[in-house]
Image (cartoon, rainbow, N blue to C red):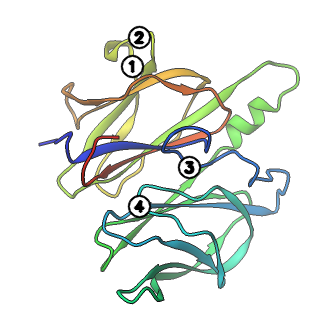
Amino acid sequence: MFDKKMCGLMMLGLSSLTLMGCDSSDSDDDSETDSAYIQFYNASANSTATSLVMDEYEYTSVAFSDSMPRYSYATGSVTMEIYGSDENGDSISIYSEDMDLDKEENHLFVLYGDYHSPELLKVIYDRSDIDDLNSDEDNEYSKMQVLVANVTAEEMAFDAYISLDTDSYADATMIGSVDYRGVTSELMLDTDDYIVYLTDKGTDNVVYTTSSMSLTTETVYKFMIRTVLVQVI
């Protein structure tokens, strides 16, 4: 059963909004078409501050429920690691993987689970459609995308919906179904004010509803469904 005291919906979007990381910011340079793009989010509730390390280059560490901005990174083979701290406060590698980064790929790395045996969800998403439309000088498009990932618990599965904040759940559009460790496809919408709803998978039983959110920047908004220790976010 979904427990609002133990689960929250975390949005990764603009750094100017409360509890959000950055997807479209001064850290981006989308003109670098030979680059890939990387972002890191810490969803491990009992973790120390953790940091993304790419080929021994360490980015600024982030605490639980925080994220680093989206950065461009050179394409090709790379060793990706996550650093944390041991009981003495010394830096240690808690995750390591060799991977390839392809041209214009967008990667979101999500650390989740028990800090002492963490897991990593690797989200790869495509924002080329909104970038193409928003750069069309012959039309006044203002598009954004949303996606949802689930790093709660193994038995939790949801359907995610979104509607304008002037509408109700009955008018909502389905973003997608998302099992534990899963992620939906990107859904493109006009920039506006929206509400997101979670239902038990395969039902119309709404178990979580956000407040109105201003999704008015031409970016990709990433929602993390994750367990929390104390409060609903």
Q: Nearer the viewer, mark 2 or mark 3?
A: 3
What kind of element bears circle 2? loop
Q: Are marks 3 and 1 in contact (CB under 8 Å)?
A: no
Compared to residue 218, the image places residue 14 above or below, namely below
Kind of residue at badge 3? Gly
Q: Residue at 66% across / 28% down in the picture?
A: 143
Q: Residues within 10 Å of mark 1 (few under 14, many from 20)?
A: some
Q: Are marks 4 and 1 in contact (CB under 8 Å)?
A: no
Q: Nearer the viewer, mark 2 or mark 1?
A: 2
Q: Residue at 75% across / 30% down in the picture?
A: 133
Q: Which mark is residue 167?
A: 2
In this picture, residue 175 sits left or right of residue 191: left
Residue pointed to by mark 4 = 64
Residue pointed to by mark 3 = 21
Q: CA distance from mark 2 to mark 1?
A: 7 Å
Give residue 87's quadrant in the image: bottom left
Q: CA distance from mark 2 to mark 4?
A: 33 Å
Of the residues under marks 4 and 1, which one precedes in the sequence? 4
Q: Nearer the viewer, mark 3 or mark 1?
A: 3
What kind of element bears circle 4? loop
Q: Nearer the viewer, mark 2 or mark 4?
A: 4
Of the residues under marks 3 and 4, which one precedes in the sequence? 3
Of the residues under marks 2 and 3, which one precedes in the sequence? 3
Q: Which mark is residue 172?
A: 1
Q: CA distance from mark 3 to mark 4?
A: 12 Å
Q: Residue furthest left?
A: 1
Q: Quadrant of the N terminus?
A: top left
Q: CA distance from mark 4 to mark 1?
A: 31 Å
Of the residues under marks 3 and 1, which one precedes in the sequence? 3
Give residue 118's quadrant in the image: bottom left
Kind of residue at badge 1? Ala
Compared to residue 117, the image places residue 25 above or below, namely above
